[in-house]
């Protein structure tokens, strides 16, 4: 430390430090970032750091890989690294070494992420777990020909939409790029139906499109269908296979679709491809890095991290876990209320962390509350777009990694935030090893009834979304439509509209926070998931109000015992509504149903409910009173 620094005299910034300060302040939305302020403690996260590398390249002409930003998170530290390396590509840190142009006449290997999806699809050929689906709504005077022209522009620019996947001569999966053939957008007209019938017909059409398998050897691995509901109401059904898709890619697609439509309606040609490399080149590069041993250091980190694997997560379930999961599932869409959303964002800014970290830490706290377990492991996806060339690329690049965090209920939420932040930053410094390689390196015994290491996943889709404004048409998106499957016991996908809005007009995408909550129907009833989701939101509200209080002091308000009893009876007796004084036996209950009711109540309430109590106290009011007697004050009536 210099004498000026030791006595508090601020030294003038160098030209590089000024440029870095301007870039980071713009991305973080602050105007007082000091040279020694930590980028991540002021709300930075992996996506913002990656965006900053692009702008640094534009302004300074220096390639700064993401791991360098993670290791040098202050303006002064990163400027020192840049001064030391100059404009030379760093010998060990330049991730682009080896990235080249693959000969399109030859089949190419799949990327590691694609390979993992391909294997799972082969094991479960009838599953649509890896179909992504969304509805694009157009209100106004839509030009269908312009929309078709825009879609063709996207397909022509991005090879992944013209790629097939099949077995190569050596028995391993490969992919081939095919020439562009014009895509004819099919149109279904439902406008002649009665207004009350159109939504039902749209739902049936959507279900059929979702259930249809993709022949992987015949591109495109995407389906679009335009549905006309009225002269001024259209919906574009979008289904694509995850072999060619991740969340970041979808936002790129939406932005390009809107831009292409604007071009088409004004008589302009569709934009030509401007990217130097395409996804196939990146897939080959990723495969070479993995097979060459270049990632052995990263793999060693994960091997050490999981040398003693965590115990399986024992969530309270409604049914015994089957020996082999069916992967059938459903999903809920939950909008956080405006007050909670604003509070979470303000809290994140005050703590100098990202919104993702606050929501992720809250989910860890809720999992501990549900299970009592402290050593928790949750899957979470990293965009993994460390190369500047991947920022506008469409393809399957994301990597889902195991985030292992210890939750101590005697410590406050702020300590959990800090522990989760350390885990996430370490994962971001070791982002390239695919999960199935981590699993193989751990040499753990397999349990076919559940996913290894983590049974729940948490995703945060804050990839940049450009303007969707169109002339004479309002375009909106409903993403993540349930495809009737579940890859995990529970999978939460957060869609934060405000955080996606870089490149769009202020307020265009709104500021809502949507949770898409996917769950396995092998294990859970919808009412159980609704309860867990409500408790999670309560816990988040408590955490931002009491961040320094021990986690064990958090008390969420669950349904009363009486409400839980009536809900369980309604499920088992297939009855819409049960009053507190309705008789279980008179409604069709019997000894076997009483045993099932007792087991389900024991799970829901976290107490032992004897089956005999259900028969001896046959109304919900009586049974709730008896449970309260059995448990003292442990369960609220």
Image: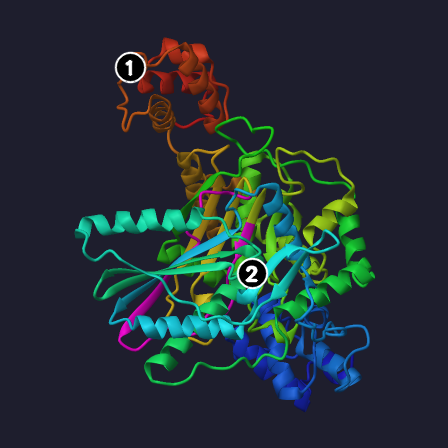
Q: Main secondary structure of the magenta part?
A: loop
**Label 1 near label 2: C-beta < 8 Å?**
no
Mark 1 crowdedness (10 Å alpha carbons): few <14, some 14-19, many ≥20: some
- Decide: is 416 above or below 387: above
Q: Is residue 208 left or right of residue 360?
A: left
Q: Which residue is mark 2?
A: 244
For image coordinates 26% across by 66% down, the residue present is: 139
Q: Which residue is mark 1?
A: 583
Q: Secondary structure at mark 1?
A: loop
For image coordinates 32% across by 12% down, the residue present is: 585
- Decide: is 314 above or below 343: above
Quadrant housing the C terminus = top left
Mark 2 crowdedness (10 Å alpha carbons): few <14, some 14-19, many ≥20: many
Residue 275, visible in the rendered structure: yes
Q: Quadrant of residue 102?
A: bottom right
- Decide: is 395 above or below 535: below
Mark closer to the observer (2, 1):
2
Report the front residue among 303 and 563: 303
Q: Secondary structure at mark 2?
A: helix
Q: Is residue 77 left or right of residue 630?
A: right
Q: Position of residue 361 (x, y in %)?
A: 56, 51
Q: Position of residue 514 (x, y in %)?
A: 42, 55
Per the rendered image, the range of residues in magenta is 458-487
- Decide: is 577 above or below 40: above
Label number found at residue 419: none
């Amino acid at each position: 430390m210099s004498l000026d620094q030791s006595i508090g005299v601020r030294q003038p910034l160098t030209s590089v430090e000024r440029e870095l300060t301007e870039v980071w302040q713009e991305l973080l939305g602050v105007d007082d970032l000091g040279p020694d302020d930590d980028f991540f403690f002021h709300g930075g996260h992996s996506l913002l750091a990656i965006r900053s590398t692009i702008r640094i390249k534009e302004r300074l002409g220096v390639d700064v890989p993401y791991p360098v930003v993670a290791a040098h998170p202050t303006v002064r530290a990163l400027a020192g690294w840049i001064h030391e390396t100059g404009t030379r590509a760093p010998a060990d840190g330049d991730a682009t070494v080896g990235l080249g142009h693959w000969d399109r006449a030859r089949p190419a290997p799949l990327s590691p992420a694609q390979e993992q999806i391909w294997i799972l699809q082969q094991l479960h050929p009838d599953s649509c777990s890896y179909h992504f689906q969304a509805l694009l709504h157009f209100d106004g005077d839509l030009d269908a020909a312009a929309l078709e022209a825009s879609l063709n522009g996207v397909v022509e620019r991005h090879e992944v939409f013209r790629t097939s996947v099949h077995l190569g001569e050596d028995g391993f999966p490969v992919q081939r790029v095919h020439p562009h053939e014009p895509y004819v957008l099919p149109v279904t007209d439902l406008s002649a139906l009665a207004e009350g019938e159109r939504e039902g017909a749209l739902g049936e059409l959507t279900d059929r499109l979702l259930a249809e398998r993709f022949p992987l050897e015949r591109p495109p691995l995407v389906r679009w269908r335009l549905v006309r509901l009225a002269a001024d109401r259209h919906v574009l059904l979008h289904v694509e296979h995850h072999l060619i898709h991740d969340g970041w890619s979808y936002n790129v697609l939406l932005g390009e679709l809107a831009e292409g439509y604007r071009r088409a309606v004004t008589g302009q040609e569709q934009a030509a491809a401007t990217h130097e490399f395409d996804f196939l080149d990146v897939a080959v590069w990723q495969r070479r890095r993995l097979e060459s041993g270049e990632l052995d250091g990263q793999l060693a980190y994960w091997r050490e991290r999981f040398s003693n694997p965590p115990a399986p997560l024992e969530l309270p379930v409604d049914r015994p876990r089957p020996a082999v999961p069916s992967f059938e599932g459903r999903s809920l869409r939950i909008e956080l209320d405006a007050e909670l959303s604003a509070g979470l964002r303000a809290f994140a800014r005050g703590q100098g962390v990202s919104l993702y970290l606050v929501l992720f830490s809250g989910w860890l706290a809720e999992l501990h509350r549900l299970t009592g377990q402290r050593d928790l492991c949750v899957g979470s996806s990293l965009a993994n777009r460390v190369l500047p060339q991947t920022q506008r690329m469409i393809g399957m690049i994301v990597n889902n990694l195991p985030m292992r965090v210890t939750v101590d209920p005697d410590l406050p939420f702020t300590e959990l935030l800090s522990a989760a932040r350390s885990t996430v930053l370490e994962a971001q410094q070791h982002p390239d090893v695919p999960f199935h390689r981590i699993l193989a390196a751990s040499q753990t015994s397999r349990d076919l009834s559940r996913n290894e290491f983590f049974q729940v996943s948490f995703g945060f889709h804050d990839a940049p979304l450009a303007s969707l404004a169109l002339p004479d048409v309002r375009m909106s998106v409903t993403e993540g439509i349930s495809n009737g499957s579940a890859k995990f016991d529970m999978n939460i996908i957060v869609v934060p509209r405000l955080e996606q809005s870089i490149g769009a007009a202020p307020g265009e995408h709104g500021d809502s926070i949507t949770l898409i909550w996917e769950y396995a129907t092998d294990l859970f009833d919808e009412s159980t998931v609704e309860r867990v989701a409500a408790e999670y939101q309560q816990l988040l509200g408590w955490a931002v109000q009491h961040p320094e209080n021990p986690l064990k002091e958090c008390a969420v308000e669950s349904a009363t015992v009486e409400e839980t009893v009536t809900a369980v009876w309604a499920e088992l007796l297939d009855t819409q509504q049960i009053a507190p004084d309705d008789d279980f036996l008179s409604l069709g209950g019997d000894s076997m149903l009483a045993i099932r009711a007792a087991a389900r109540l024991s799970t829901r309430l976290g107490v032992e409910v004897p089956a005999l109590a259900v028969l001896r106290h046959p109304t919900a009011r009586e049974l709730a009173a008896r449970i309260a007697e059995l448990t003292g004050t442990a369960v609220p009536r």
